[in-house]
Amino acid sequence: MLDTTREIEVPEGVELTLAVAGLVSRALAFMIDLAIRWIGLATVSGILAYLGNFGSGLFLILVFVVEWFYPVLFEVFNQGQTIGKKSMGIMVINDDGTPIDWSSSIVRNLLRFADFLPVLFGFGVVSMLVNKDFKRLGDLAAGTVVVHKRRLNKTTSNFDQDGLSPKLPLTLAEQSAIISYAERSDRMSPSRAAELGNVLAPWLDQDLIKKNPDHSSVTLKRMAKWLRGH
Amino acid sequence: MRQEEFEDRYADDWKKFETQINLAEALKQNKQKGDTSLEGFADNYRQLCYCLALARERHYSPILIDFLEALAFRGHQSFYQKRLGIWQNICHFILYGFPRAVREQARFVWTATVMFYLPIVVVFFLVVLFPDMIYMIVDAQTVTSMENMYDPTAERFGTERSSGSDFYMFGHYIRNNIGIAFQTFAGGILLTIGSQFFLLFNGFVFGAIAGHIYNIGYNDTFFSFVIGHGAFELTGICIAGAAGLQLGWALLSPGAYSRKQALVNASKSAIQLVYGAIFLLLIAAFVEAFWSSTHMVSFNTKYIVGTIFWLMVIAYLTLLGRRGQSNKKVTHGS
């Protein structure tokens, strides 16, 4: 499989499928975080400058904390998401799907230094590209993985035509293809829906399709409704 | 059962469980006040997993399965989160966990210690025998600034530094020294090479400077300065290096595990050493900024206090936490 998914089995006996986050979304998230850190530090340095040497000392401590622990604090207290990760819709979790804890987060973020070597995250990128879960060295040691955060996107369809039983016996795979098509077709343009509908159903009445380009998509939705139980 | 019937039957339960998850997530971030009852969470979560398994088995639509999976994932994350009792854990770790971790990983700690102190001793004597060697290891500018810093005739030794600039140095030491410790640790994942490099390199430089200071006779200003915080700082660096060696060694010699699993296991115990190193280096930064630099006490006092610091560190690491459970049991039970 070319899919970048990862299955974890939870103690309740079901498997959860997680979409592993790739190089690009993670790099973008990192750059967003970097920008936030720089802007934050620059702002604070302006304020602390009024406090003389004491302020400079405080600033150095702050730089240290932000340099090493900005991601740790966010990951532990914000459900595995720094601001950059949140904006990219990704999160870091333990390999077994549980929320990341202090130790794992600290390990992966301290090892960012090794990922950065020899230049510009060289080792980190190589490690991510050869690893099927896109893990950098820090993830490998900490036993963590960065995944796309799941969204609850269950839309209720307002399709109001009657169900229609298919003329032919359909296999399970065909049935689920039709249902899946019907559920997704709300989010497609009508012409795209018609195009895909025609691919799916060469066995529909071709004359009716020629007269009305929506015919295949409407028929498939009705079949889906029937298959789902109406 | 058709999908519609299935959804109708369980929709209310899923809705209810979703609100419970929202509540649980809000509780974790301390955003929720008032009603905090999560009664029946476990049952609802198990029922949801059951529904998910059924929906898969019956080949219901991918969107429904997706929806149930997303809920199950959030339920899983809420249900299996770890308790974060941080202050209690820190105290327990300092009093018991850290000294135990050091003794359990004695192999790596001793290796790192030798890698750090051996170059110090060797280079010290080399520089004492061949004074010009200092310029092969440390650049001339640094040597000059070191000479100025520890020049006993310098004016600033008569005057006390202001507390503001003491604090500035405190910040500097924290950022610099703990940063070096972190790099020494992180470099270890590269098959121990990074940790070895930082241990040896820092040993070389420190030995060379100490040798040079001895040659030019600024002994008291230099050694009375370093002895105090050195107890914490040099030990901290060695322990951070030991943690790095442990990571790399897991890759080189994974034993009965796969390299990946050996690395994960090693990082679990190595991070204990890193926590301890942070603890020691925070003390070191404090001592270095506010005690080592003070000129109100005599050199002899500093030597005595410094020696006491060294004995304290050694006693701490060798004697504390010998009674009670071992680390493994504690982490297992928490």
Image (spheres, rainbow, N blue to C red):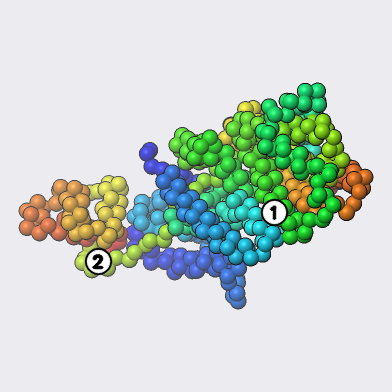
Quadrant (top left/top right/bottom left/bottom right) for the C terminus of chain A: bottom left
SS type, badge 1 = helix
Mark 1 and mark 2 residues within 8 Å of each other at the beta carbon: no
| Direction from residue A175 to residue A102 in the image, left or right | right
Q: Is residue B123 above or below residue B294?
A: above
Please tell me which residue lies in front, A135 or B127.
Answer: B127
Q: Which residue is mark 1?
A: B171
Quadrant (top left/top right/bottom left/bottom right) for the N terminus of chain A: top left
Number of marks present in the image shown: 2
Q: Residue at x 54, y 37 (%)?
A: A117
SS type, badge 2 = loop
Q: Residue at x 67, y 33 (%)?
A: B139
What is the three-letter code of the residue carrying label 1?
Gly
Estimate how packed mark 1 is, as few (under 14), some (14 to 19) or many (20 or more) residues with alpha carbons within 10 Å. many
| Direction from residue A31 to residue A159 in the image, left or right | left
Please tell me which residue lies in front, B186 or A6.
Answer: B186
